[in-house]
Amino acid sequence: MSTKRIEKIVGKAIPMPRDDIDTDRITPARFLKSITFEGIEKALFCDERENTPDHPVDNPAHKGANMMFVGKNFGSGSSREHAPQALKRFGIDVLIGVSFAEIFAGNCFAIGVPLGVASADDVNELIKQAQEEPQTRFTVDIRNAAVSYGDRVIPIDIQETRKAAFLAGTWDMLANLRGNLPRVEEVAARLPYVTNFDSEAQ
Amino acid sequence: MSKNTLYDKVWDSHTVARLDSGQDQIFIGLHLIHEVTTPQAFGMLKEIGSGVAFPDRTMGTVDHIIPTLSQIRPYEDELAEKMMAALEQNVNEFGVRFLHLDSGKQGIVHVIGPELGLSQPGMTIACGDSHTSTHGAMGSLGFGIGTTEVGHVLATQTLALNRLKVKRIEVTGALGPGVTPKDVTLRVIHDLGIKGGLGFAYEYGGDVFDDMSMEGRMTVCNMSIEGGARIGYVNPDQTTFDYLEGREFSPGGEAWERGLSYWRGIASGDDAEYDDVYEIAGESIEPMVTWGINPGHSVGISQPLPEVDSFAGEDRKTAEHGYEFMDLKPGETISGTKVDVAFLGSCTNSRISDLREGARLMKGNKVHPGVRMLVVPGSQQVKQQAEEEGLHEIFTEAGAEWREAGCSMCLGMNPDQLVGAERSISSSNRNFIGRQGSPRGRTHLGSPAVVVSSAIAGCIADPREMGE
């Protein structure tokens, strides 16, 4: 389980306007039939890309981008981790959006992809900048919770505690959770249903 | 901040620790696993040399990828066969209980959990599937999780979670004839929006829920996630206890009495406080059908489709996209829209009461010649019960296909898929673009009653207008 500090991400951005982009669109269900995440990036937005000749993901001007700007409620629907895995494996290291679906956000944190939340106006500005000047290099500064380009600095909201975990490189929760295993046993012993209400075992 | 709700009580009693991440480490009382979201998680255990921490609190089955027509191994689809074999090997290697096809108890995880009495009030339940919210109908907290988190539960029986706010959704009065729990949940999502539940758990209550069957409550809780709420639940009551009594994994004898006392104790108190409350009059709900590309794009079956001007900002663009994709226009009514496929099934509506309701309406009628209809029970036990009652004959005599248990046409992971631009009326939970397997396929969501009345009419039809 490798885990690394995430402090700053610098690079180009793919603009993905529109709200409510669900995980069926990010990675259609028929591409989930695999026992590894290897190659899942090939499924990224694949149906949309096939039907949209100028899809932002395929636009050569955005080639090599390592961040994505999105609208409201990004990642809604299915809990499939294949969606953030596809984004990460495609090369997206951070997403900035107006809001994110709950399970998607948890999955992103679990695999070390920071999410930054900004106002709709600010996100629209970022999307416009990436669309009109795709070579723009943006900097996402996790510590100072901001995205910047040129002279422009836009504040973003990163959940304080998650921010600390990215900066310290402790976002992989498994070690933390395992460290508390003795306490897990204690909690289990207090819950009567764990023995199916057999009083003698309590 | 909410106080003394079921959510607060269960959260507090299951908290192991406050983590440095600011999240709470929550004990998971029941972990349901299936073939799609677990292989990478078992791989993670092997990598770190960990076993499954609480194999007795873990139960596996297979649902997403299994064909519902021929289940002879090896499956024609090599990828499906590979996933199936991986799950079989993992449950063997890690000593996890598994309800296989030959157990007679296999089915969609969210159908078999309650059916077997595995899902009980006051539990935390996790599964690598967003519709785990279904189990909230039992008075439990059901968390849909991703694969890395499945690994966390396997290795530690816990999750790192953020505490949610609690919104009480009160549906007062009574439902009109022909109006079902599916219509209630579509109406909630219509009113509050698909983003309305972000950061919230929904507590459903009021007269309509007090009078609702357990299976109806499962339908509503199932779709909480479609409104953005990761969790939805109903407080346990006598209806819950009557449902649980005598099920395979329910406590029996003296233990049953101890169970009752625990379950009564975890319900929201009379003095419970909520972060928000939303009220709907039951009488104002009519059968709902979706017209667009997310579950919030719905309309009362007799109402005109909404004008795009009624949506603001980006929602307007999504609505325009929805109309374009679905080939519909504002101002039209949804009924009368021709359909090619009718699907009765999925973790939302494939339980025995759904099939009974469908069969009651289907009896003496025929599926329209232009419609292909699939009826897919949610579990082997539901299938068996339906066959004992002769429901399968009503469906097959009408010209519908009667299938084996599985997720089927809810999502394109098995052979049951839309083809090309086919249009379906479906009792499932998502009308996202591409959801039913064809990138151009068009999905309308509705209740089992709407699915059957539409299958007969060949177009979306109001079940209240069917001659009885």
Image: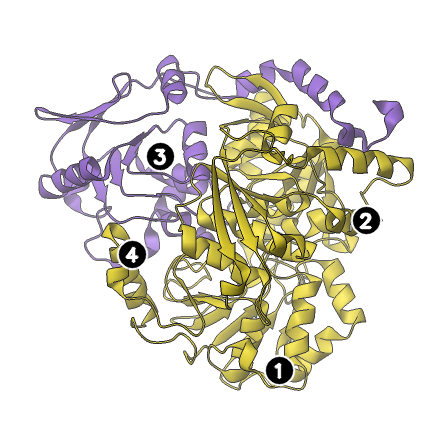
Specify the quadrant that holds the C terminus of chain B: bottom right
Task: Tell me the element at label 3.
Answer: helix
User: In the image, which lettered chain appears yellow?
Assistant: B
Mark closer to the chain start, 2 or 4: 2
Determine whether A26 is above or below B366 in the image.
Answer: above
Q: Are marks 3 and 1 on the same chain?
A: no
The percent coordinates of residue B287 (x first, y second) are: 51, 68
Task: Tell me the element at label 2.
Answer: loop
Q: Which of the two discs, 1 and 4, sits closer to the camera? A: 4
Mark 2 chain = B
The percent coordinates of residue B53 (x first, y second) are: 68, 25
> Looking at the image, which residue is at 51% across and 32% down?
B148
Mark closer to the chain start, 1 or 2: 2
Mark 4 chain = B
Q: Amino acid at mark 4?
A: Thr
Circle 4/circle 3 CB separation < 8 Å: no
Q: Return the residue at label 4.
A: B318
Q: Are marks 4 and 3 on the same chain?
A: no
Q: Nearer the viewer, residue A146 or A111?
A: A146
Q: Return the residue at label 2.
A: B247
Q: Return the residue at label 1.
A: B399
Q: Residues within 10 Å of mark 3 (few under 14, many from 20)?
A: many
Mark 3 chain = A
Kindly report the distance in space between the C-alpha atoms of the residues bearing marks 2 and 4: 45 Å
Res. A88 mark:
3
